[in-house]
């Protein structure tokens, strides 16, 4: 497969700037090493791309790799904006892939439970696939029992995005764009969407979402990576220690639609305010755990309306830690309950029950039908703008 190196005009300048800054520090060793490196001028975060495969209609799907000097590499394909691989360090400094995925486009096309994908127009469920906006009733596909899930039959996870690259002061970015036509999947308005993945030199991936419309519509975009910080996908995620900064969560009905109640987590298995192992209470006798077949709920994040640290996950065996920052009101924690040992793992075997978890930052499920939930309506002249950052470290 052909590899094209991409020209990064400002990266060299950035690197020189970084080198200058670190040479001002007190560590003589780092001053010496940057002096020699500055002669070869490597950008702190590199982007390369290659052809990944072809869709049935002949269009090419590309794969981009963002890689920083530490060794973190994030691979993204233009189909669905899917993160196919994402390496993170363990406490010995070894970078290993920590997201579930497949090893070919045909597998993503055949049956993908949203591994790594961008989700839209509406992440999560809308009851009975219906909502009323400005007096008009809209009908969406019911692709999850009686409900609409993750944008419908052909959501943003199943479309081809156009790609651009850039370097900024924050790192290197892959900019994905998609024009969603008026009434696509039943949603009103031509929606211009942009999702930017920016890898930083300090092992964080920023996901910036932007959208504008020419007619009132609803938008709720999210990222659906399944993490397993052990790097060993034959292991469950039950030993991961999870923290969610939320005093309340949204109980659901039998079809996983919120009942409308904001319930306190206190005294329930849904209390993750202090980090605890995912497996500690997942088997508890609680009606909400029965309905979700485990955790598959949206938490009402504290400190609404600000960018803040909302969740962290830690794998004690490897020391890997993931922290999630967002300005969104909610987070869906899904404990991989529907993984059932039927989907193929790269290198052989299949993904077993609860071998990956998702932390999907978002607005609350079914918001268009719940008058007390924050609005998800986007109108002409407004810009939908939101950021989520995934930061890796070790401890
Ligand atoms: C949902 C789960 C669903 C999964 C699909 C999650 O976002 O909350 O209920 O099964 O996506 O893989």
Image (spheres, rainbow, N blue to C red):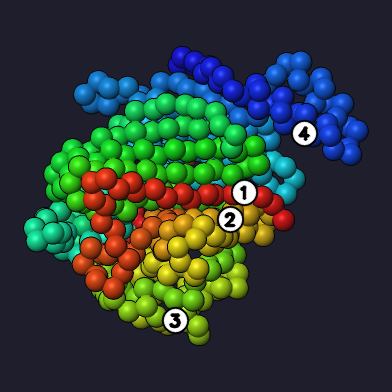
Q: Mark 3: few, some, or many residues within 10 Å (few <14, many ≥20)?
A: some
Q: Say what secondary structure mark 2 lies in.
A: strand
Q: Mark 4 = which residue?
A: 21
Closer to the eye: label 3 or 4: 4
Q: Residue at x 59, y 54 (%)?
A: 322
- 301 vs 232: above or below: below
Residue 180 can be seen, yes or no: yes
Quadrant field for ligand 1: bottom left
Q: Earlier in the sequence, mark 3 or mark 4?
A: 4
Query: In this figure, which residue is indicated by the disc labeled 3?
Result: 264
State the separation of the CA atoms marked 2 and 3. Answer: 23 Å
- Crowdedness of circle 1 by 10 Å Cα count: few (<14), some, many (20+)? many
Q: CA distance from mark 2 to mark 4?
A: 26 Å
The residue lying at 66 percent from left, 41 percent from top is 202
Distance, label 2 to label 1, CA atoms, is: 6 Å
Mark 1 highlights which residue? Answer: 392
Is there a contact, CB below 8 Å, between mark 2 and mark 1? yes
Is 27 drawn above or below residue 370 in the view shown?
Answer: above
**Residue nearest the viewer, comparing 39 with 59:** 39
Q: Is residue 167 left or right of residue 214?
A: right
Which of the two discs, 2 and 3, labels the residue nearer the N terminus?
A: 3
């Amino acid at each position: 497969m052909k590899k094209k190196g991409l020209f990064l005009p400002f990266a060299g300048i950035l690197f020189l700037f970084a080198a200058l800054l670190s040479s001002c520090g007190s560590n003589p060793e780092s001053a010496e090493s940057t002096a020699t490196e500055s002669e070869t001028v490597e950008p702190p975060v590199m982007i390369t791309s290659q052809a990944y495969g072809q869709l049935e209609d002949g269009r090419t799907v590309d794969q981009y790799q963002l890689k920083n000097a530490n060794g973190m590499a994030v691979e993204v394909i233009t189909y669905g904006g899917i993160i196919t691989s994402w390496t993170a360090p363990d406490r010995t400094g070894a970078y290993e892939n920590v997201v579930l995925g497949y090893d070919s486009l045909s597998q993503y096309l055949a049956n993908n439970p949203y591994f790594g994908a961008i989700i839209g127009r509406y992440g999560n469920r809308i009851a009975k696939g219906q909502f009323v906006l400005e007096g008009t009733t809209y009908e969406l596909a019911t692709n999850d029992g009686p409900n609409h899930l993750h944008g419908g039959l052909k959501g943003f996870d199943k479309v081809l995005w156009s790609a651009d690259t850039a370097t900024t002061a924050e790192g290197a970015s892959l900019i994905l764009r998609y024009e969603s036509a008026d009434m696509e999947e039943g949603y009103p308005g031509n929606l211009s969407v942009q999702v930017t993945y920016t890898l930083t030199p300090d092992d964080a991936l920023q996901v910036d979402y932007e959208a504008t419309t020419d007619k009132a519509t609803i938008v709720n975009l999210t990222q659906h990576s399944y993490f397993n910080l052990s790097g060993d996908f034959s292991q469950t995620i039950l030993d991961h220690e999870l923290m969610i900064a939320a005093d309340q969560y949204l109980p659901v009905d039998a079809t996983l639609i919120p009942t409308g109640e904001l319930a306190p987590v206190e005294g329930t298995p849904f209390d993750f305010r202090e980090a605890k192992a995912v497996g500690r209470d997942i088997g508890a006798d609680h009606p909400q755990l029965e309905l979700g077949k485990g955790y598959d709920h949206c938490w009402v994040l504290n400190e609404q309306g600000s960018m803040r640290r909302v969740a962290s996950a830690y794998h004690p065996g490897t020391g890997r830690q993931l922290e999630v920052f967002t300005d969104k009101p909610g987070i869906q924690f899904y404990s991989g309950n529907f993984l059932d040992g039927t989907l193929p793992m790269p290198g052989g075997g299949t993904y077993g029950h609860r071998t990956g978890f998702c932390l999907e930052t978002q607005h609350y499920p079914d918001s268009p039908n719940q008058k007390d939930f924050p609005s998800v309506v986007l109108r002409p002249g407004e810009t939908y703008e939101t950021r989520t950052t995934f930061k890796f470290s070790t401890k």
